Image: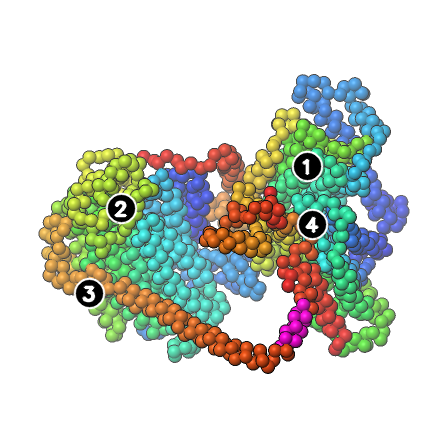
Amino acid sequence: MDFIIGLIFWGLSALILFSGLMVVIVKNIIHAALWLIASFAGIAAFYFLLEAPYIGVVQILVYTGAISILMLFAIMLTRQVTGEGTQQLFKRWWVAALVAFGLFAVVIVPTIWFPRLPVAERGQPTYWPQSDRAAASATPAAAPAAQQEPQPEAETPQIAGAFEIGRSFMAEYLLPFEVSSLLLLVALIGAVVIAYEERTRRRRILTLAEEAELRRSVAGLGMERPLQASAQLPPGKSEAGTAERR
Amino acid sequence: MDFFALAWLIPLLPLGAFVFITFFSPLYRSRIISGSVAIVAMLIAVVLAWGILFQAASAGFGAGSESHAAPAEAAHGEGTVAEGAEGEGEHGGVHFEGFGGAYSQSIAWAATGTTTFNVGYLIDAPVALMLAMVTLAGFCIHLFSMGYMAHDEYPAGHERQSRFFSFIALFTASMLGMVLADNLLLFFICWELMGLCSYLLIGFWYFKPSAYRAARKAFITTRIGDVFMMLGLFYLYTQAGSLTFGTAEGQIFNPALLERLHNQTTFFGMSAATAISLLIFMGTVGKSAQFPLHVWLPDAMEGPTPVSALIHAATMVAAGVFLVARTYPIFIESETALTVVAAVGAFTAIFAALIAVAQFDIKRILAYSTLSQLGFMVAALGIGGWVAGLFHLLTHAFFKALLFLGSGSVIHGMEAAVGHDPNKAQDIRNMGGLRRFMGVTWLTYMIGYLALAGVPFFSGFFSKDEIIADAFGRGDTLGYVVYGTLSVASLLTAFYMTRQIMVVFYGPFRGFQPRPVDPQQDYSEAVPVETPAHDPAHSPAVTSASHGAHDSTAKTYTTHATTAAHGATAHDTHGGHGDAHGHHEAHEPHESPWQMTVPLIILALFAFGAGYANIPEVAGIEFPGQHWLSHFLQQEAAEFNILVAGIATLLSLAGIGLGYAMYRGAFARATDLDPLEARMPGLFRILNNKFYIDELYAATIGRFTNWFGRGLSFFDRNVVDGTVNGVGVGSLLLAKINFIIDDYVLNQGADNLAEGTAITGDGLRQTTTGKIQDYGALIFAGVLLIALIYLYAF
Amino acid sequence: MRSIVTAMPLEAILTVAAALFCIGLFGALSRRNIIGILMGVELMLNAVNINLIAFWRYLEPTNTSGLIFAIIAITVAAAEAAVGLAMVIAVYRTRLTINADEVDTLRG
Amino acid sequence: MRAMWEFFFGVGWLATLTSYLTITTAILVAGSLVMMLLTWIERRGLGYMQDRKGPNRVGPFGLFQPIAEAIKTITKEDITPTDADRWVHFLAPVVILASTVAAFAVIPWGNLIPVDINVGVLYIVAVSAVHTVGILMAGWASNNKFALLGGMRGVAQAISYEIPQVLSLVSIVMLVGSMSVVDVIQNQMDPYGNILSWHIFTPVGLLSFIVFWIASLAEGERPPFDNPEAESELVAGYMTEYGGMKFAVLFLANYLTNFAICAVTAGVFLGGGNGPGSDIPILGTLLSVFYFLAKSLGLFFVMVWIRGVVPRLRIDELMHFAWKFLLPLALVNIFSTSLWIAIIRWGAEQGMGIAEALGAPGSIARIAVAWVVTAIINVVAFFLVARLNATRGVTTYQATPTAV
């Protein structure tokens, strides 16, 4: 059974990491989004494996079903459908790679160095005690074997599920619950406001250069008129302006 | 039926009505539906509240209380068991025996970390009484509003009655919630809600500048008190760790805690109890309009009359007194605080009574009378007459609601004669002889008047007498001072009420030639009617013509900044009203519809009979139900002092006689002088202008603010700007010198330096690429660095 | 009942999560397309969530705090995605591009 | 099942794996059979509604018509458009079918329960929501504007209707106190076969059923919500560029989704496999499967009926219907569910002694009170929302004439 679980675990990990990598490096942005969905689905399965089915289902519902669809929609709305042939990575991508890899290395080295987190000693701070790093590193092989012994969980503690989540959301986590719901509401309204395009009166937004030129032309005419954005563009600029839309 | 278990419905019913009306009035923009919803909700609340009262009176409060906080029960403890454990209140000769039994239920409301706030309700004897009073008065006022607001359609075509009913429903709901609250936090929330509602309702006719000014004034003035009260609550919370009423461990009336508050000394050498009590009392001063902050209450007359009744009788001002009554165990720990309370109350009582003598607006007289009566109650609480204060609160609520609704009825009737102009319809000099036109109103108003004047066998007599007897029976200086003050105030009360009655209901009717509006006292200032191109400087002829043209015009408020000649156009002016009343030709005042008279009759019964709840024994004669209230409140019954009662009766009768003698033949015409003004013009002017308190505030606080602002402006313009300018000029000078040195001495070096700077800047500029990802990479590089340092550098 | 707790050490899961986080970080830092950046951020958030759930399962399986934290993180991620994509659309509308290196008004 | 295989193999994990594979195979096979049956029902039903025969040549009553068509479809050439995105085009039907089949993992067939997870109801909704991804993939990868439009429409519609769907299930979950499908069905079990214990016969359950059923129709792209594949506007929507076996898979997924909707509705609102005699040891299982299929197919016939009767909605009407009609109703229903629970489950000790105070502490009286209260709220809300929707769309408010 452990073997099967291990197999599933590594399979899922491979799926998650591979599709995550594809999200990052693939050229077509739609394909990236689809790989992202695969990654999300793998993570949901991961939650099932970790015996958090509620979170897993929520992951499917929210990420796979909603957020990634939202992203696909956004991609299609911005009409950058292909993306093929253009450079998809930033010029200094190697800096990013360096930073990311460095971070991973920095995290992974201590994890491999001290293979077992001090889970057993409750009450101890759970970061790595600096003083006995040498002692731990002296016996790198013995420590994991001793501590990795599976704790015989005789009574099989009741794992918290959806019921307990609901209970604690209504009791001790009421305030975080309210705050996050408020956050969601605000984000919703904010998103609508940001993305809303009023049909009847669309305002042009002038670039700085255009505005300066406009000022100059108005001053040159010697007329003290208030700036009226769309009406007073110098001829020839109105259609070619970079900010002009539809 | 167990009414206690249903008590939570009482505030929720009007609240539900509020929600219903608010959300559904856009659909059914109908006065009948929204009003009926509110009235039915109030009716059920009345049934429940009186059920609670009867259950409490007959069966007591059961075996203490249960508190069932769902998850946080253990944290909260055993709920409120207040079984008369309040034996300690023996400071300063004040005797108070706790609130008696109680019934409370609470559920966990908000868990914030370690603390859990509970929300629940608590019923004990004063709460049961208040519930009965508030629901009944509130119901009567709701019903009355159905008739009174029937023609309020300003601006034209907008029936705003739905809004009105939703507001008063919310008002009543918050008052009921406040009464039922089992902790001071909920209490304060409802308290503030009431402040909001008073703002909304006083400014209900917000298109009148005076109305929105009054609303703003009420809101801000009470807010001053509320800030202090909130400070008091904070202080109390830091001391008690809880705001729940009750004597158990961890609740605010816990004897050990009160003892600690009594002994602990804080700022200015006050004890903590004194500080908390005075801070809380500031809330009362604001809400109940006691002396320094009383200015908002008379202005609150700008609201519709039912609102005035609601504010003055059932809700707002009663809330302040109820606050002191509710937190009384803290007050009695501090003699200083009680003395302050008594002094403020007594001073307000006589001060407001004096002002009321010289007012002409029928509602203003009642408003100052309310101030004065509130002073009575507060003074009663201050001298230790807890029962007397509550008793007077109850009786006063009934007869003052009656008087206000009666005055509303009078105004409603008057509007048929003089038009919808509050300056005319509310001026008592324009009334007279209304007894002939409005029989029911007259009769009920007389009952309210006799109760307020303290004539024996009416309710006001018993409660006022108990206050005075308590003050007299105290036997120390404070007691005698309060006794004297209140006696004079009750004499004045009888006097000014008699004056009002004589002028309003007797004598000839003067409404057909109303007084020209004194521009000084024009409360209703300019309001254009719905004609868009209305000339603000219109002539009466234009006004009448425009009204004639608009048959559907509803209530119209116009500026009549002119003259007696305008009287001739009065008939035209209220053409819109005539439309609503079916074009009757004889514009005489008329009796109000049944929606308005029925509440008057109900309230008149209580205004007469409520006093018998605490009837004392006179000369050894036993009455049935004697001292019922005292027993219900589980306090010692006050002794009856035949001497005090006799003196009080004599004073009342003297006031009535004086008023009758002075105003019997006064005001043959509406333009006549007041007899008192004829005799003592100087004093009358002072009183008529309310001791110039408003002007005083304007001249001191207002002017101080103004001056302060100007001073700041002056400082900014001269000192700050001067400094800046000086620095600028100095810089210029220095620059000149610098230029010389630079040009001839440092030129070469500076050029090099500048070039170097430019090159460096250009180099550094490359790092500010404006690309978000560069910044992100830098941030995470920093994280990486920190992690490296953390892991390997130590 | 055998479960992942006995089959896998916690470090394995943490390593996977760290790798996913770094992949997401790389994506967020190197993609030109703003939506690509958002995808990277989503990956990072998911890696964090994996960590939260793993710690919850291994250390405090009877307590709900880890789950609650994860749910709130998902909420925040949803809000972030909504606002972020709205901003992408707004940027696209004003600049006709959603390449991050062309949106450089901050440039010094 | 697992015990049986454990007997054969003697190895635990192999038994588990095999039992799961067996169940999966069974579901797939049964699914295909049911799909054939459904297409036959649909075509015959529509035929009778339109006063014609429908397929009646192949086999008795045309019963073998689906098999003939399956053979025809399978033997067709598999075409991929030149400019299509090959992999995505290929994977889209797979994703759609997978999401649909995954939902069957927790749907009990009468007393036969494949898996019982404690978040079953949410799982069904979540998994079947994934098919939107497939639709978008199909629409986009075909490189055809009709397909893309159909895909976009399908996604917008599915996402919008997911919200009332989930919210209507929330009230049922509140009623039951568990998200397990088995618990939901168990909650409607009555030892005397009393069908009044089905959820649909409570006011809360009825409104929930209405909302869920309509939203599910839209989720499954059944008429009148078949805008994504509206043949008169979009050729065949996102399925335009599919042919042969891939089209068959899409078609299969479509009918499986419909069957899943019927099955879930039957389970959640109509008591699943409950019926007279369904608790007898062996025979009861067969009976329960029969009941379950009868209810599900009955519901499917309602679907066909709706298809035959109701015209297709315009896309904006469809959106308005989701957001302005179903969503408020679902929210109101959650409110009245909480009232129902408060009245039925809570007593005076929780501070909600409505029933005691009214002098009716018995459970029947409580149910009666709760029934009346929630029925009033739901009916009022239904007509109010309907009226709001009716008036809002047409005219803006006009002030009523001033009362005289």
Q: Which residues are magenta?
A: B750-762
Q: Amino acid at mark 4?
A: Tyr
**Could you say which is closer to the camera, residue B16 or residue B645?**
B16
**Could you say which is closer to the camera, residue B265 or residue B123?**
B265
Q: Secondary structure at mark 2?
A: loop
Q: Chain of mark 4?
A: A
Q: Where in the figure is residue C30, as x and y percent of width and height?
A: 74, 57
**1 vs 4, front mark:** 1
Q: Amino acid at mark 3?
A: Val
Q: Earlier in the sequence, mark 3 or mark 2?
A: 3
Instruction: Identify residue for label 1.
Output: D149
Name the quarter where the C terminus of chain B is drawn.
bottom right
Residue visible at 43% across and 65% down in the picture: B230
Instruction: Identify residue for label 3.
Output: B488
Q: Secondary structure at mark 3?
A: helix
Instruction: Identify residue for label 2.
Output: B558
Q: Classify 10 Å Cα crowding around label 2: few (below 14), some (14-19), many (20 and above).
A: many
Asked if the residues shown at circle 4 and circle 2 are in contact, with their CB atoms under 8 angstroms apart, the answer is: no
Q: Classify 10 Å Cα crowding around label 4: few (below 14), some (14-19), many (20 and above).
A: many
**3 vs 2, front mark:** 2
Asked if the residues shown at circle 1 and circle 3 are in contact, with their CB atoms under 8 angstroms apart, the answer is: no
